[in-house]
Amino acid sequence: MSKVHIISGPAKRTPTAVGKAIIDGQGSVPYPSPKESAAPNTAKGITVTGKKKGMRSALRGSRFKSC
C-alpha cells in the first residue's frame, strides 16, 4: 500500500462576511436587503389560458393552459 503525505501549514484564517461586493480599484456595491413580496393565492386554483409566441409553437401547439 502506498501513502500520500501532504506537507502543509496551519489553515489560513477565513475572511469575515461583509454586506457589500468589494471591486478592486473601483469601490464597493451594497447587497440588497430582503423585502416582503406578495405571493399568489394558490387556494383559489385559478386557471390561466393564453397564446404562445415563439418557442416552436407550430410544432407544440399555439395555446397553453396553466394552473
Image (tube, rainbow, N blue to C red):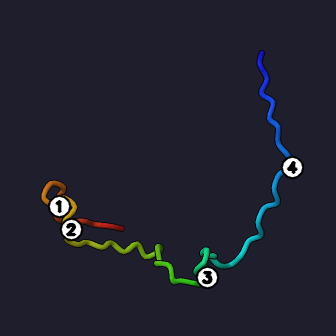
Mark 2 secondary-structure assignment: loop
Q: Tag 1: Cα neighbours inside 10 Å, few (<14), some, or many (≥20)?
A: few
For the residues labelled 1 and 2, say whether their Cβ atoms are less than 8 Å apart. yes
Type of amino acid under label 3:
Gly
The answer to which of marks 4 and 2 sits earlier in the sequence is 4
The answer to which of marks 3 and 2 sits earlier in the sequence is 3
Q: Please state which of residues 42 and 37 is positioned toward the viewer in this rendering.
A: 37
Q: Position of residue 67 (x, y in %)?
A: 36, 68
Left or right of 38? Residue 61 is left
Say above or below: 10 vs 67: above
Q: CA distance from mark 4 to mark 3?
A: 32 Å
Q: Look at 77% across and 69% down and name the residue there.
A: 16
Q: Position of residue 57 (x, y in %)?
A: 17, 61
- The residue at which mark 1 appears reads as 57
Mark nearest the camera among 3 and 2 is 3
Q: Please state which of residues 63 and 41 is positioned toward the viewer in this rendering.
A: 63
Q: Which mark is residue 33?
A: none
Quadrant placement of the N terminus = top right
Left or right of 45? Residue 65 is left
Q: Look at 47% across and 74% down and name the residue there.
A: 43
The answer to which of marks 1 and 3 sits earlier in the sequence is 3
Type of amino acid under label 1:
Ser
- The residue at which mark 4 appears reads as 10
Mark 4 secondary-structure assignment: loop
Please identify the residue farthest to the front as the structure is shown.
Answer: 25
